[in-house]
Image: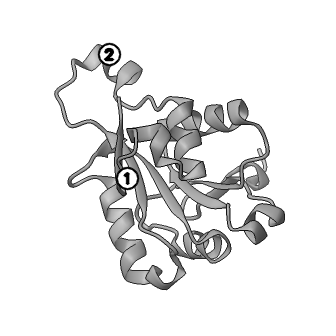
Amino acid sequence: MSVDFFLPLHKATYLAKASQASVDAGTAVTVLTYLHGVKEAMDALAELGEDYGVDLIELTSLKPLDMDTIKESLARTNRLIILDESTKSGGVGATISARVAEEAFDLLDQPVQRYFRAARLVYYPVLRACTFKCKSRHAQAAWNFDWQAVHGGCSGALLYCD
């Protein structure tokens, strides 16, 4: 096998890139995710169609975190959603959110939005099936910043998926 077939583990990977039209219209968003969140985000994008201006970035490494790619995308979209497999407190998404606030705050037009796993004990065999399963309506609402559809009018920067 050639080295051309391998991804560098220290670099994040663009899985989708928002169109320049969505960036110019101010509707584009950067979505960061990893592991199972990649499948959920790709499924949601497939269901929603190509009209959504999403820079979907897979974090192939969490340490080191590829802040250069994150900043490059935020410079285009100015909005960030993190799809996180951990819980609200002490999770990967919280750490990424803190790093973005410290190193790229001036690139954000609004608070970082986080989808994370509900903090509850889960029996291991069902862990894969239910701990991080965002419905496409949540992804669509988040990517459109339509909080009415997600919480019936309640707005906030922290969201979780059941």
How dense is the environment of label 2, judged by Cα within 10 Å: few (below 14), some, or many (20 and up)? few
Which residue is drawn at the image coordinates 30% and 14% (left, top)? 125
Residue 137 relative to residue 82: left or right: right
SS for callout 1: loop
Tell me if residue 151 can be seen.
yes
Mark 2 or mark 1, which has the lower sequence index? 2
From this view, report whether residue 109 is shown above or below residue 158: below
- Quadrant (top left, top right, bottom left, bottom right) of the N terminus: top right
Residue 80 in the image: state x and y as whole percent.
51, 62
Which mark, by number, is residue 126?
2
From this view, report whether residue 66 is shown above or below residue 85: below
> Which residue bears the numbered disc 1?
155
Residue 115 relative to residue 91: left or right: right
Which residue is drawn at the image coordinates 63% and 77% (left, top)? 75
Please name the amino acid that badge 1 sits on.
Ser
Residue 81 in the image: state x and y as whole percent.
49, 56
Which residue is drawn at the image coordinates 78% and 46% (left, top)? 51
From this view, report whether residue 112 is shown above or below residue 108: above
Q: Given this view, does label 2 or label 1 mark the residue nearer the observer? A: 1
Please name the amino acid that badge 2 sits on.
Val
Which residue is drawn at the image coordinates 43% and 82% (left, top)? 103
Residue 158 relative to residue 49: left or right: left
Measured Cα–Cα span from mark 2 to mark 1: 30 Å
Task: Please name whichever residue, 54 or 146, is drawn nearer the observer in this view of the structure.
Answer: 146
Tell me if residue 8 can be seen.
no
| Outermost residue to the top | 125
Residue 10 in the image: state x and y as whole percent.
54, 64
Quadrant of the rendered image containing residue 111: bottom left
